[in-house]
Image (cartoon, rainbow, N blue to C red):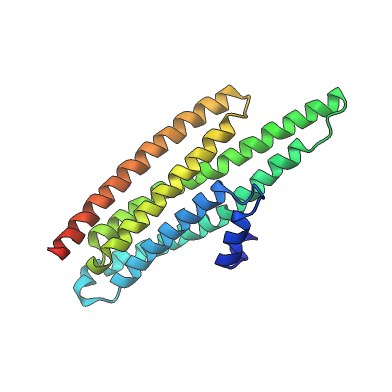
Amino acid sequence: MLTEKTVVKFLDELASNSPAPGGGSVAALASALGAALTSMVANLTIGKKKYLAVEAEMISLRSKTEELRKAFTVTIDQDTEAFNKVMEAFGLPKETDDQKALRSAAIQEATKEATLVPLRVMKLVVDALALTKVVADKGNTNSASDAGVAALMLHAGAEGAALNVYINLNGINDQEFVGWHTDEVATLQRTCKMKTDEILAIVNEKVIKKQS
């Protein structure tokens, strides 16, 4: 499993001539890093006298961000597994008409599954960004920049996942599936961009004030 490798080993495998892991797994990893940073800001707020008024909220939030981090971490491997299933489908025999039909159906089904993994990442990012906004706004001011980096990582994860959704949709014949999810991913992109901009506005105001 990719998630059980050291950082160095993961990067070595990523840089190799193997097509997987690829951008989808990296998008999931970026999202997991964003969720982890959000948890960190919450942890650096909890227990501080200055932030006692928001401690209960931060404890509850941390529980949610940790669940999201786990979910993102799972999708790191799921994306690679989904890609491998697509490749396996392309490798099925295609000598007879029956074999061609079975192969085509398998490719379509596997590609749909490969589309849904990054789409799930995007949906989770929306939830994570909502929590990141809270820690950016109410969390430890000394960690405001960390909240900003969390938002940027989450947004990068969402945009990377979107690219993987789009490229998979290009290979799907089911136009109803394609149309529905094309609209869905575009909506998720707009939502993630809006939330990220809101967080960065909060963070930049705090960072600039601290420097002045």
Query: Which residue is depicted at the point 54% across and 47% down?
Result: 23
Query: Dividing the image into 4 quarters, which one contains the C terminus?
Result: bottom left
- Which percent across, then down, holds residue 44? 31, 72
Kindly identify the residue that appears in the image at 84 percent across and 34 percent down: 93
- Left or right of 136: which side holds 209? left
What is the x, y in percent for residue 104? 74, 29
Considering only vertical position in the picture, is 34 above or below 157? below
At 38% across and 63% down in the image, what residue appears?
Answer: 37
Q: Work out which residue is located at the far right of the displayed protein and give it.
A: 96
The answer to whether 89 appears left or right of 17 in the picture is right
Residue 80, compared with residue 35, is above or below; it is: above
In the rendered structure, the answer to whether residue 115 lies left or right of residue 87 reads left
Q: How many marks?
A: 0
Query: Percent from the top left, x then y, of residue 196?
Result: 32, 47
Indicate whether 105 appears above or below 27.
Answer: above
Residue situated furthest left in the rendering: 212
Residue 155, position as x, y percentages in the image:
39, 48
